[in-house]
Amino acid sequence: MSAMRARVLIVEDHPTMREAMRMVLADEGFAVDQAADGARALDLVASDRPDVILLDLNIPGISGSDLLAALRATSTTSGIPVIVVTAEEEEGRRAAMQAGAQDYLTKPFSPRALVRTVERVLGGSEPTGG
């Protein structure tokens, strides 16, 4: 499976949530990096480019939307797919997709939904919506 050992960067300030996501993805064979804020995320992206980024919009320091804009603005990072993770429903989804996210997860989500979304984005297919 092509998803194996793909590198996922989780940008999430809540330690319990971040660890839960890490465990689910590591169990599926992904290599997982973690950042609690935008500055650390940018460092990790620069030093060890992820294949996909899971980005919580509600992070301290650089906001998630500013981080997404920064990633999209730089040629070295503009190709990295970003999955926005947020507790906001439809309005958050629209804003995220307009900002350049590839896909969208609304909290709370199941481990299965997390894995399916990451695999779908890595496989290059469009979000199914809904």
Image: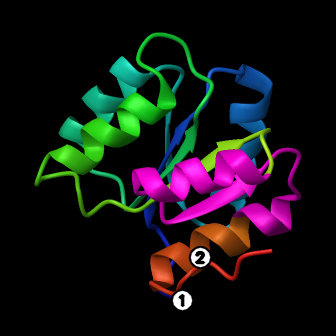
Q: Position of residue 63 (x, y in %)?
A: 47, 22
Position of 48 with respect to 83 (left or right) is left
Sooner in the amino-acid sequence: mark 2 or mark 1: 1
The correct choice, above or below, for 42 with respect to 88 in the image is above
Q: Amino acid at mark 2?
A: Glu
Furthest residue toward top: 61
Q: Quadrant of residue 81?
A: bottom left
Position of 2 with respect to 44 (left or right) is right
Task: Verify CB contact (< 8 Å) between mark 2 and mark 1.
Answer: yes
What colouring does the structure picture have?
rainbow
Q: Position of residue 32 (x, y in %)?
A: 51, 48
- Mark 2 packing: few (<14 Cα in 10 Å), some, or many (20+)? some
Q: Quadrant of the C terminus?
A: bottom right
Q: In the rendered image, is residue 77 in sight?
A: yes
Q: Quadrant of the N terminus?
A: bottom right
On residue 28, the disc is none
SS assignment at label 2:
helix
Q: In the rendered image, is residue 22 in sight?
A: no
Q: CA distance from mark 2 to mark 1?
A: 10 Å
Task: Please give the name of the residue rendered at 54% of the width and 50% of the height, measured from the top-left corner.
Answer: 96
SS assignment at label 1:
loop
Q: Is residue 89 magenta?
A: no
The residue indicated by pointer 2 is 119
Q: Nearer the viewer, residue 95 or 111?
A: 95
- Mark 1 packing: few (<14 Cα in 10 Å), some, or many (20+)? few
Which region shows up in magenta? Answer: 90-114
The correct choice, above or below, for 91 with respect to 83 in the image is above
Q: Position of residue 36 (x, y in %)?
A: 54, 21
Task: Please give the name of the residue rendered at 46% of the width and 68% of the height, measured from the top-left corner.
Answer: 5
Task: Please give the name of the residue rendered at 60% of the width and 67% of the height, measured from the top-left corner.
Answer: 118
Q: Nearer the viewer, residue 4 or 105?
A: 105
The residue indicated by pointer 1 is 1
